[in-house]
Image (cartoon, rainbow, N blue to C red):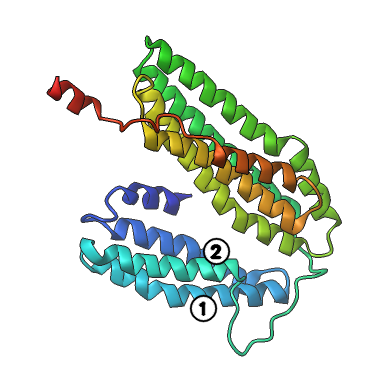
């Protein structure tokens, strides 16, 4: 938590003059727990797994370090390479050449704990979107169009919450608890959650812009407002399709409908308020 505090504080200037405040805490936050697990994990399989994780971190570390030293104009390319290595390692459950990969069936694993962590992560993301709505409403408290648009976005957010925390969550818990390979189930869920995160971020960004300028026609914010929930539903549909039975078709259908709906505000180009006032 302490390392994440400094890493998040350094995010704003990561591409300016303070990249080390971002990279050093981030690398430590990843490497220290993995090193501990590589030595003290409860099973030989987990210890071997985290040793592989450390090897993948060693492969990406030079890119993070060089990116922090390099100039701001090329830093993004070094860090994109580092992030790509880390993501590939995460998605493939870091393999190592020449090492026979053991299956994950019937291995001891606290799947319930990991599901709880993903559930809490989702709650935090939904809560951040609510806070974004509250901030925009506070900035425009007397505009009826803004208040009505905010109410609509809030109702949509409740629907997204119910989509998972209703019957879907029960299906996930029941499926994982009965699975002979709970590690695979959790791994699929952790990979899919990237799409859930992207969808909620897009929803928050689109709703913030659209609500702040509810009386204008903002095409980009309208696209984000529909694409965010579509990606959210599509990510969940992929999870249920790969690792469960049922509940994927309604989500595929919902994502397809949101994709087909014309975004609000696509009829004209949005002009920022400052330009409107200067032109008038």
- Residue 238 seen: yes
**Numbered mark located on residue 55 in the image:** 1
Q: Is residue 95 left or right of residue 240?
A: left
Report which quarter residue 61 is drawn in.
Answer: bottom left
Instruction: State the residue position of label 2.
Output: 33
Front one among 16 and 265: 265
Instruction: Sort mark 1 into few (<14), some (14-19) or many (20+) by Cα contacts within 10 Å.
Output: some
Q: Is residue 121 left or right of residue 248?
A: left
Q: Position of residue 178 (x, y in %)?
A: 86, 56
- Circle 2 SS class: helix
Q: Is residue 243 left or right of residue 190?
A: right
- Circle 1 SS class: helix
Q: Position of residue 23 (x, y in %)?
A: 36, 61
Separation of disc 1 and disc 2 at Cα?
A: 14 Å
Report which quarter residue 219 is drawn in.
Answer: top left
Front one among 31 and 53: 53
Identity of the residue drawn at 58% across and 87% down: 97
Where is 152 relative to 81, above or below? above
Where is 172 relative to 124, above or below? below
Total number of numbered discs in the rendering: 2
Identity of the residue drawn at 77% across and 61% down: 182
Identity of the residue drawn at 49% across and 37% down: 203
């Amino acid at each position: 938590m302490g390392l994440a505090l400094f890493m998040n504080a350094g995010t704003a200037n990561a591409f300016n003059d303070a990249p080390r405040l971002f990279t050093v805490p981030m690398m430590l936050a990843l490497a220290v727990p993995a090193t501990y697990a590589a030595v003290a994990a409860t099973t030989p399989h987990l210890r071997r797994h985290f040793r592989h994780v450390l090897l993948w971190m060693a492969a990406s570390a030079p890119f993070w370090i060089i990116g922090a030293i390099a100039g701001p104009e090329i830093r993004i390319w070094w860090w994109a390479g580092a992030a790509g290595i880390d993501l590939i390692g995460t998605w493939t459950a870091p393999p190592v050449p020449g090492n026979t990969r053991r299956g994950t069936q019937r291995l001891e694993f606290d799947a319930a704990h990991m599901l709880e962590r993903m559930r809490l992560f989702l709650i935090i993301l939904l809560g951040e979107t609510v806070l974004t709505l509250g901030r925009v409403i506070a900035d425009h408290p007397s505009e009826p169009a803004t208040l009505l648009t905010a109410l609509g976005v809030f109702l949509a957010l409740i629907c997204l919450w119910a989509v998972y925390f209703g019957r879907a969550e029960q299906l996930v818990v029941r499926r994982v608890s009965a699975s002979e390979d709970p590690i695979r189930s959790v791994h699929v869920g952790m990979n899919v959650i990237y799409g859930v995160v992207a969808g909620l971020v897009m929803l928050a960004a689109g709703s913030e812009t659209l609500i702040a300028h509810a009386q204008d026609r903002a095409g980009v914010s309208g696209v984000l407002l529909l694409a965010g929930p579509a990606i959210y539903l599509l990510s969940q549909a992929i999870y249920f399709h790969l690792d469960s039975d049922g509940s994927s078709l309604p989500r595929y259908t919902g994502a397809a409908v949101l994709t087909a709906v014309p975004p609000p505000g696509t009829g004209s180009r949005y002009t920022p308020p400052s330009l409107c006032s200067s032109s008038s």
